[in-house]
Image (tube, rainbow, N blue to C red):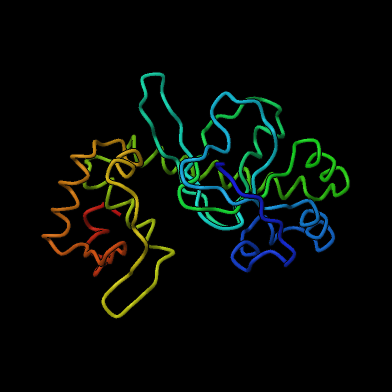
Amino acid sequence: MATMRETMTTSRTEAQRSGEFFKRLTPAALRDLESMEFPTLYQPGVQLFSEKSAPTGIFIVVSGEVKLSINSSEGKRLILSIAKAGEVLGLSSVLSGLPSEMTAEVLYPSRIAVIERDQFMAFMSRHPEVYQVVTQELTMQYKVACEQLRTVALSGSAPEKLARLLLEWSENGQKTESGMRFRFSLTHEEIGEFIGASRETVTRTLSTFKSRRLVAFHGSILEIPSRVALEHLAGV
């Protein structure tokens, strides 16, 4: 089995509550939404939905991470973002009724709550104020996608693109005496799909960054000793 059902009897975790979508809901709307959630544990590699698939519902990331990407008919992939706890996926297609414009694939073991389209539309009818919350969430998602496309299409070299990506990921990292640290467990191929570069280019660029002491690796943790130095390379 690809998934394992886990009904939750406790309230949503603090990590999920920190999501901007949930912060904007009224207490009544939040309680109503929580009553419809039955999180399921999904293993890495499972697709929640794919491009051109009919909308089935929204997907609430309770824990874990989900990779969002767009793919060409030739098999090329561009990763748009990594969704984390507190994020809501599938809103656009659920509201429009149109096929999804991206693919969502579980990156790490994740608990996902699925709310069917009819249920969610009825929820919005009961709480009209949620329409504004949804609009704000879609606007934020649009801005994230635009930033990613700007990085891939308008940044000059692969080192500049990679530097920008690492700086973005480090914003939510842990600040230590030796620099900013964050989990860095994507493969070099997946990183290449973020910046439109080959796996070999990513490997070579990271090696150069390491030799120039722009980054340091500690297992699955990446450390940026000096954001200023990396920002200079990224042209920020």
- In the shown orientation, is residue 10 left or right of residue 53? right
- Coordinates of residue 68 in the picture (x, y in percent): 49, 40
Is residue 7 or residue 50 the one in the foreground?
7
Which residue shows up at 26% across the image and 36% down it?
197
73 and 127: which is toward the camera: 73
Q: Is residue 124 left or right of residue 82?
A: right
Residue 105 sits above or below residue 210 on the image: above
Residue in front for this viewpoint, 175 or 34: 34
Which residue appears at 88% of the width and 47% of the height? 126
Q: Residue 115's image quarter?
A: top right
Quick one: quadrant of the C terminus? bottom left
* Residue 72 at x, y percent in the picture: 41, 23
Residue sitting at the far front: 1
Number of disc labels: 0
Q: Residue at x 84, y 47 (%)?
A: 128
**Left or right, residue 114 beside residue 128:** left
Quadrant containing the N terminus in the rendered view: top right
Residue 98: % across, % down: 66, 25
Quadrant of the rendered image containing residue 54: top right
Name the residue furthest left: 211
Most extreme residue toward the right is: 126
The residue that appears at 41% across and 63% down in the rendered structure is 171
